[in-house]
Image: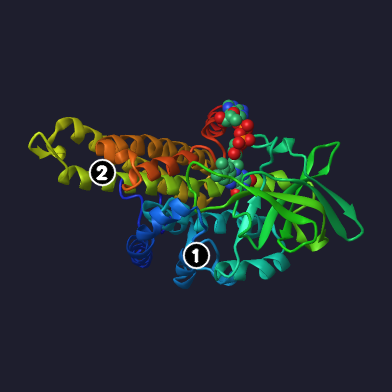
Amino acid sequence: MTPTDTTAGSGVYEVPEELRDFRDLVRRLAQEQIAPRAAEIDEKGEYPWDVRELLASHDILGLPFPSEYGGTGTGTLMQQIAVEEIAKACASSALILMVQELGTLPIQLFGSDELKERLLPKCASGEWSPAFALSEPEAGSDPAAMRTTAVEDGDEWVLNGSKNWITNSTIADFYVVFAVTDRENRRITAFVVEKDRPGFSIANLEHKLGIKGSPTGSPVFEDVRVPESNVIGEVGRGLSVALGTLERTRLGAAAQAVGIAQGATDYAVQYAKERVAFGKPIIDLQGIQFKLADMATRTAAARELLYTACAKIDRGDPDKAQYSSMAKLFASDTAMDVTVEGVQVLGGYGYVKEYPLERMMRDAKITQIYEGTNEIQRVVIARSLSR
Ligand SMILES: Cc1cc2nc3c(=O)[nH]c(=O)nc-3n(C[C@H](O)[C@H](O)[C@H](O)COP(=O)(O)OP(=O)(O)OC[C@H]3O[C@@H](n4cnc5c(N)ncnc54)[C@H](O)[C@@H]3O)c2cc1C
């Protein structure tokens, strides 16, 4: 995307030819190779390694990275367009790309050159996957309440504690872990913890409502030692690392939501053309037409807000955090409402697993919860307004 002036009214996005080509490639791969797998991924609840390989082999896992680290260097909009296209087919698969960004952005934004060189190229190629471990059993919306600690011992840090709800648990090659390093002043620091460090384990994996192909688990740290060089950014500034990352990556949840909503709308429209009731296709019934019109309108509006927020992030506009939160809030609420309506358009067929709408509805719910709940997004937006 050329980050042109998004305040200028019409014609605000100019997606250049090469990005449109990339979008078409992702769309084709998603529709031809990922969509046919989506029901099975959901049913079996298994991480789709084949999809990850597919994404890696077409440079799609390089989207979150600058070219100097082997990435595509194509910016935030292209990343989120790809998430959207994949989520349209399979929300679990979209998470592979989302977490590739979430688990490496702290290093990209705040890490040392040595850390960047050590970790980013292997992630850009898709050989490695990361995880982002902020949430804890007693600390989700309020990360400052976390209990995991890291204590300095010579030129090493020793981590103890446990995290909760961590996407890519058991899959990730390394975890970006946030731990309290100054109990008195509640100072937090971010660390890289490789999966093979002694004392590191995954306690359990969750059984979830949706995104079942993405493992969510609880990493545990029992006297896990990492070298000084694994610290991300400044000691004591970990909360800034976390919030600076989430400010951008919540656009991934927004893009996933737009993709789910578009997938649900497309399917419902097609279904309504074919399903006959009272002697004619149900798409001829005004009650159904109005539902479809609202679904399409809300999805389009969510996409516009998402793309505006992407442009603001790429340009570094002062209101980028507010727009990022607004896009996440609006897109995820849209995905939830649109998929519920989509189920209704399909009637009984919307409620059974032979049709994709019930999966889309279950997958949509998480977009209102992770990357900061929608209540927290409202807090962020309101705070920006009252500044
Ligand atoms: C499938 C899944 C994947 C996840 N992946 C990751 C991951 O990879 N890494 C990671 O670190 N975390 C991850 N999370 C955690 C997720 O970010 C948290 O669940 C989320 O931030 C909410 O925290 P919580 O569950 O502790 O809810 P709580 O913080 O306990 O919130 C409970 C309710 O209270 C509301 N609430 C809390 N504070 C306020 C407030 N100030 N004003 C108004 N309402 C408020 C919340 O919105 C919510 O409705 C994941 C969660 C799930 C379910």
User: Is 343 on the left or on the right of 73, as rendered?
Assistant: left
- Give the residue number, with chain letter if any, for mark 2: 268
**Residue 371 in view in this figure:** no
In the displayed structure image, the side of residue 290 where residue 252 appears, left or right: right
**Secondary element at image label 1:** helix
Q: Residue at x 45, y 68 (%)?
A: 54
Quadrant of the rendering where the C terminus is positioned = top right
How far across and how far down the image is residue 376, in percent? Answer: 57, 33
**Residues under numbered marks 2 and 1 in contact, where contact means CB atoms less than 8 Å apart:** no
Q: Residues within 10 Å of mark 2 (few under 14, many from 20)?
A: many
Give the numbered dot on residue 69. Answer: none
Q: 34 or 118, which is in the foreground?
A: 34
Instruction: Say whether residue 199 is visible.
Output: yes
- Residue 113 x %, y %: 70, 66
Q: Which residue is mark 1?
A: 52
Which residue occupies the extreme right position in the image?
154
Can you give x and y, in whole percent of width and height, for residue 204 in the image?
A: 66, 48
Q: Residue furthest top?
A: 386
The residue at the far left in this view is 279
What's the residue at 57%, 52% (across, down)?
215
Q: Amino acid at mark 2?
A: Ala
